[in-house]
Image (cartoon, grey):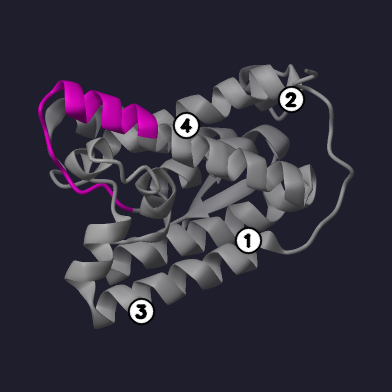
Amino acid sequence: MNLRKPFRYSFNNAVLYLIGINLFIFLMQYLSRDVVTYYLALIPSRVLSGWAWQFITYMFAHGSVSHILFNMLALFIFGRQVENGMGTKEFLLYYFSTGVLAGVFSFIVYTAAGVNVALLGASGAIFAVQLAYAALFPRAIIYVWGILPLRAPVMALGFTTLEVFFSITGLQNGVAHLTHLAGFGLGWIYFLVRFGRNPWKMFKRGA
């Protein structure tokens, strides 16, 4: 099996469909929050009872308006460029493999720690998308909060460093920092395995 065999390039605006699905599911959560979240969020005890679909569906459920708006804005800004650069098929493989595996990693850690949380949100995959954007477009300038100009690699590494800080200090409770970091790390591994390219070297192209 050739892990590096490329897909035939196509661009089909998959990001817009992903955003649409996320918004639709969030509307369903708004109408029947407890029921929808119970079935879609990644809950370790439910997964252990056979609800394996939650490794996928947790990526489409969100906890608040700000949660989904931030994730969908990031997906729109970075995801469309990454999809255009990779092609739709490669992008979807990247998005779902990093998101699902970030969920699997979090599930293993939470289960080992005896913690039964409800994990939800696309943030793990979004962190992977930000990494891909920084690797593919290392000279791009991003205005963080609309005012602070940063090169894409600085932005991606900066946000990830903050996740490490918050994860260690516990200053932001209720946020799945572990899943965010897993998404970033799995995106890095994906580039190494699938493309045979080191994101760090790609970052330095824009230095």
Residue linked to disc 4: 184
Helix, strand or loop at mark 1? helix
The tag earlier along the polypeptide, 1 or 2, is 1
In the image, what residue type sits under mark 3? Leu
Residue 118 covered by magenta stretch: yes
Q: Which secondary structure, mark 4?
A: helix
The span picked out in magenta is 104-120
Residue position marked by numbered label 2 in the rendering = 205
Amino acid on which the number 1 mark rests in the picture: Val
Name the one closer to the observer, 66 or 109: 109
Q: Which of the two residues, 75 or 153, is positioned nearer the viewer here?
A: 75
**Camera sees residue 146:** no
- Distance from disc 2 to disc 3, alpha carbons, whole Å, reads 42 Å
Contact, mark 3 vs mark 4 (Cβ under 8 Å): no
Magenta highlight on residue 15 = no
At label 2, the amino acid type is Arg
Q: Residues within 10 Å of mark 4 (few under 14, many from 20)?
A: many
Residue designated by label 3: 27
From the viewer's perspective, tell me whether residue 8 is left or right of residue 167: right
- Depth check, mark 1 against mark 4: the one in front is 1
> Which residue has dot 1 on it?
15
Can you say whether 175 is above or below 75 in the image?
above
Furthest residue to the right? 8
Cα separation between marks 2 and 4 = 20 Å
